[in-house]
C-alpha cells in the first residue's frame, strides 16, 4: 500500500519510460487526492483482514485506522468497501486452495504488505516497494519454492493493465530475489529456475474483469521467471539513466500523472516541444519552396484540411495537447500579471456567468417557502431514481438487482465521438481478449518499453470475466 519515500518507487510507472521525470518531479509535493485517500482505506481493510484471517464484513460500520496521517478521522467500513475488499480476499482463498491441489503436500504462505527490494540486486537502495499480497507455495521441509504470485489490489475505476506492468514486474522480481539471486548481497548471477512458476495479478473490483493476470502456466501469456528477470535487468538500465543529472525527457501517455505536467500545474515542456517539432517537421515537408513560414503553413491547413494525408491528420491531432499546454501556460501567466496589477493589452479579469443562490441554509429556506403556502412537493420536486442508484442501493439483494438489470434496464450506447485510440488494430485486440480472460498474449519483453497503449479501456468492454465472481 505505502511505498514510503523510495526515489524509484515500484508503483511509479513514469521513470522506466522517462528518465528525466524523477528530476523534474523532485520540486513538487506529493499530495494525495480524495480518491487515493479513499483507496488507502480499502487497502488498510484488506491488510487487517489478511493479518487477522477474517472476512471483510467483520469490520462492518467500524472506523478503522483513526489518526492515520492521510486521514486522521479514519475510514468508515461500509457495505460497498466490504464488497470490494471481499472480492480480493475470495481470490486469495481460491488461489491458496488451487496451489494446495496443484502441489500436493506443499505449504502455501500468504504475506500482506511485504517489502520487495528489486534494486538491491543491482546495488541500488532507491528502488523498492511494498506488495499488497504475496502468495508462495513451498515444500514444507526443504523450503523449495514451487510457485510465487504477487497480487496488486486497485480500488479505483481507471483500468490498470496487467500486461508487462512494470510495477508487478518489480514486485515479483523483488520477492523472488532471495531465491534466485546469488551471494550474500543477493545479486547476479540469477538462477530463475529456482522459482519454476510465477503469476502477476491485478484485482480491481470496479472494472471488468475484476481479476486479470499473466501467468507462467498459461502458454499464451509468454511469461516465465526468466522473462521477469530479463525485464528487471532492463528496468535496472532505466534506473541508471535516472542518475544522470541531464537525463532526457521522453513525453508520452505516462505524462498524465506526472507532477511536472503543465496540466497539473507543473513546468515540464517536453510534450509541448515534441508537438511543435512534429508541426515543424511536417511543415518542412509540406511547405512549397516559396519562403512560406510556419504560420502560413498553418493557415493552409485551416483553409484546406482535405489536402492532408491520413497520417498527417493523425500526427497533427496528436500534437494538440502539447501545443494547447503552451497556451494554457501563457493564459496562466497573463492572469498572474493582471492580479499583480500589470496591464496586459486586450485582457482583463471579468466576472463569469453568475447564478441565483439561496442566502440561507436549505432547512431555513424550506420553512420560509412553506410559510408562503408552498407545499413540500413543490419545494422538493420528486425525481425517479436512476438505474445506477438502484444498482448501488443497500435495500436490494444481489438477486433482486440481477433481475432488475435483466428486466428493467437497457444499455443505451452513447453518441459516436472522435477519440484517440491505439495506433494498432483495436478490433483484433478486442477479439483476442474476449477469448483469453481479458489477457492478451505478449511475445517480447521489449514491449514493456514500447509506447504506453493509448486506451486501456478497450479491454474493459470486451474482456470475459475470469473467476468465480
Image: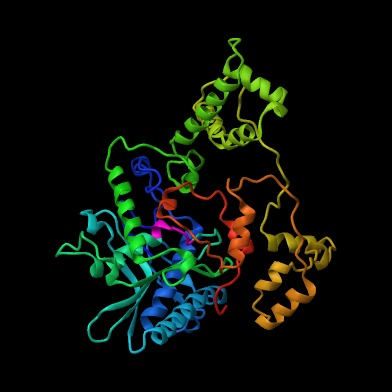
User: Is 166 within the magenta?
Assistant: yes
* Rendered image quadrant of residue 187: bottom left
Camera-side residue of 430 and 318: 430
Q: Which residues are magenta?
A: 162-167
- Look at the image and tell me whether residue 444 can be seen: yes
Give percent across and percent down for residue 340.
Answer: 49, 27
- Mark yes or no: residue 201 visible: no
Q: Is 52 on the left-hand or right-hand side of 337? A: left
Coloured how? rainbow
Q: Nearer the viewer, residue 311 or 129?
A: 311
In the picture, the quarter occupied by the N terminus is bottom left
The x and y percentages for residue 370 are: 80, 64
Instruction: Inspect the magenta stretch and tell me whether residue 291 lies in it.
Output: no
As drawn, the residue found furthest toward the bottom would be: 105
Tell me the residue at 28%/83% (across/down). 139
Taking the image as shown, residue 411 lies to the left or right of residue 319, namely right
Residue 404: image location, x then y, percent: 75, 76
Q: Nearer the viewer, residue 134 or 187?
A: 187
Amino acid at each position: 500500500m505505502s511505498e514510503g519515500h523510495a526515489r524509484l518507487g515500484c508503483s511509479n510507472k513514469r521513470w522506466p519510460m522517462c528518465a528525466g521525470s524523477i528530476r523534474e518531479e523532485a520540486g513538487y509535493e506529493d499530495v494525495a487526492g480524495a480518491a487515493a485517500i479513499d483507496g488507502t482505506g480499502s487497502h488498510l481493510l484488506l491488510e487487517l483482514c489478511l493479518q487477522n484471517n477474517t472476512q471483510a464484513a467483520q469490520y462492518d460500520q467500524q472506523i478503522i485506522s483513526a489518526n492515520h496521517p492521510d486521514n486522521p478521522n479514519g475510514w468508515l467500513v461500509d457495505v460497498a468497501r466490504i464488497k470490494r475488499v471481499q472480492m480480493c480476499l475470495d481470490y486469495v482463498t481460491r488461489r491458496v486452495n488451487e496451489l494446495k491441489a496443484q502441489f500436493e503436500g506443499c505449504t502455501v504462505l500468504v504475506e500482506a504488505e511485504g517489502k520487495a527490494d528489486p534494486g538491491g540486486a543491482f546495488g541500488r537502495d532507491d528502488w523498492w516497494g511494498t506488495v499488497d499480497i504475496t502468495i508462495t507455495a513451498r515444500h514444507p521441509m526443504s523450503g523449495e519454492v514451487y510457485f510465487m504470485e504477487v497480487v496488486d489490489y486497485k480500488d479505483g475505476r481507471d483500468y490498470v493493465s496487467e500486461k508487462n506492468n512494470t510495477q508487478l514486474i518489480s514486485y515479483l522480481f523483488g520477492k523472488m530475489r532471495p531465491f534466485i539471486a546469488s551471494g550474500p548481497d543477493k545479486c547476479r548471477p540469477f538462477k530463475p529456475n529456482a522459482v519454476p512458476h510465477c503469476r502477476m495479478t491485478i484485482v480491481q473490483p470496479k472494472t471488468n474483469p475484476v481479476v486479470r493476470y499473466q501467468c507462467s502456466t498459461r502458454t499464451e501469456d509468454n511469461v516465465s521467471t526468466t522473462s521477469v528477470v530479463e525485464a528487471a535487468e532492463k528496468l535496472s538500465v532505466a534506473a541508471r539513466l535516472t542518475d544522470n543529472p541531464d537525463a532526457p525527457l521522453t513525453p508520452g501517455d505516462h505524462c498524465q500523472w506526472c507532477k511536472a505536467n503543465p496540466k497539473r500545474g507543473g513546468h515540464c515542456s517536453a510534450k509541448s516541444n515534441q508537438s511543435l517539432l512534429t508541426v515543424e517537421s511536417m511543415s518542412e515537408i509540406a511547405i512549397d519552396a516559396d519562403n512560406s513560414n510556419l504560420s502560413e503553413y498553418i493557415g493552409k491547413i485551416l483553409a484546406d484540411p482535405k489536402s492532408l494525408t491520413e497520417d498527417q491528420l493523425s500526427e497533427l491531432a496528436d500534437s494538440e495537447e502539447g501545443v494547447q499546454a503552451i497556451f494554457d501556460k501563457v493564459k496562466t501567466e497573463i492572469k498572474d500579471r493582471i492580479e499583480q496589477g500589470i496591464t496586459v493589452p486586450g485582457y482583463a479579469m471579468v466576472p463569469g456567468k453568475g447564478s441565483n443562490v439561496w442566502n440561507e441554509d436549505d432547512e431555513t429556506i424550506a420553512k420560509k417557502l412553506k410559510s408562503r403556502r408552498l407545499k413540500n412537493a413543490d419545494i422538493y420536486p420528486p425525481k425517479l431514481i436512476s438505474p445506477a442508484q438502484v444498482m448501488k442501493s443497500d435495500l436490494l439483494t444481489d438477486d433482486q438487482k440481477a433481475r432488475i438489470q435483466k428486466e428493467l434496464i437497457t444499455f443505451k450506447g452513447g453518441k459516436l465521438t472522435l477519440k484517440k485510440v491505439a495506433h494498432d488494430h483495436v478490433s483484433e485486440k478486442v477479439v483476442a481478449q474476449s477469448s483469453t480472460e481479458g489477457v492478451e498474449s505478449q511475445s517480447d519483453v521489449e514491449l514493456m518499453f514500447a509506447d504506453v497503449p493509448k486506451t486501456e479501456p478497450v479491454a474493459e468492454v470486451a474482456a470475459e470475466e475470469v473467476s468465480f465472481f
